[in-house]
Image (tube, rainbow, N blue to C red):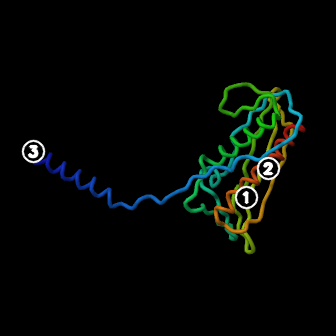
Amino acid sequence: MNKLSRVSVLGLSLLLGACSILPSAPKVDTYQLAPSNVSVQVKGLPLSLMVATPYANRYLSHQRLVVVQANHEVQAYAGVRWEDELPLVFRNRLIDDLRRAQAYRTVVNDKETVKTDRRLTTDILAYQIQMTEQQAMAVISVDANLFDNKNASVIASKRFSVNSSLNSTQLSDVMPALGRLNDQINTQIIQWAVAQ
């Protein structure tokens, strides 16, 4: 082994050894929404529906749980993340609830290359813990648009907003509250989407 090779091997050994003294990444717990309790009695439509992945601004379009402070500063809840990006978590639960309610003959997501009678789009405006001077609240707000795909027209649009006071900002209070609010907003969206 020549001198250059020995120096290279020694340098590599030192680098590999140094890796063990680097600080480990902070522990991050991954959460799902609690199982759905949506139970909607609707007369299903004999139509197909495509549910688009929701639009969300940059601070909601990721896996972090968002906290908005009383001074409007946006922060991420430390050590917590959703199982997937929030828009996908919301879309997948909405599709599941629509299918279980048999609201439409067929419900698909926007990754499936099929033609459908209608398209449901949503904009997530809030899905967060909102702090005020007096209390903490869980808040979900969504704009929904229902389109007729046959003539590319808007059938209806509506904003849905729900909130709930929290006893604390501990995850044991926060996660169940968000799950209940998600159930409430999905119930409202399903009833509205079938009534149009």
Which mark is first along the chain, 2 or 1?
Answer: 1
Image coordinates of residue 25 in percent, x first then y, are: 44, 58
Say which residue label 2 marks. Answer: 185
The residue that mark 3 highlights is 2
- Kind of residue at disc 3: Asn
Image check: 46 left or right of 83?
right
Q: Count the labels in the image.
A: 3
Secondary structure at numbered mark 2: helix
Q: Amino acid at mark 2?
A: Ile
Name the front one of labels 2 and 3: 2
Q: CA distance from mark 3 to mark 1?
A: 66 Å
Q: Nearer the viewer, residue 23 or 58?
A: 23
Contact, mark 3 vs mark 1 (Cβ under 8 Å): no
Q: Are marks 2 and 3 in contact (CB under 8 Å)?
A: no
Q: Secondary structure at mark 1?
A: helix
Q: Residues within 10 Å of mark 2 (few under 14, many from 20)?
A: some
Quarter of the picture containing the C terminus is top right
In the displayed structure, would residue 18 be above or below residue 37? Answer: below
The residue under label 1 is: 177
Q: Position of residue 144 (x, y in %)?
A: 79, 44
Q: Which of the 4 image quarters holds residue 18?
A: bottom left
Q: Tell which circle, 2 or 3, labels the residue nearer the N-terminal end.
A: 3
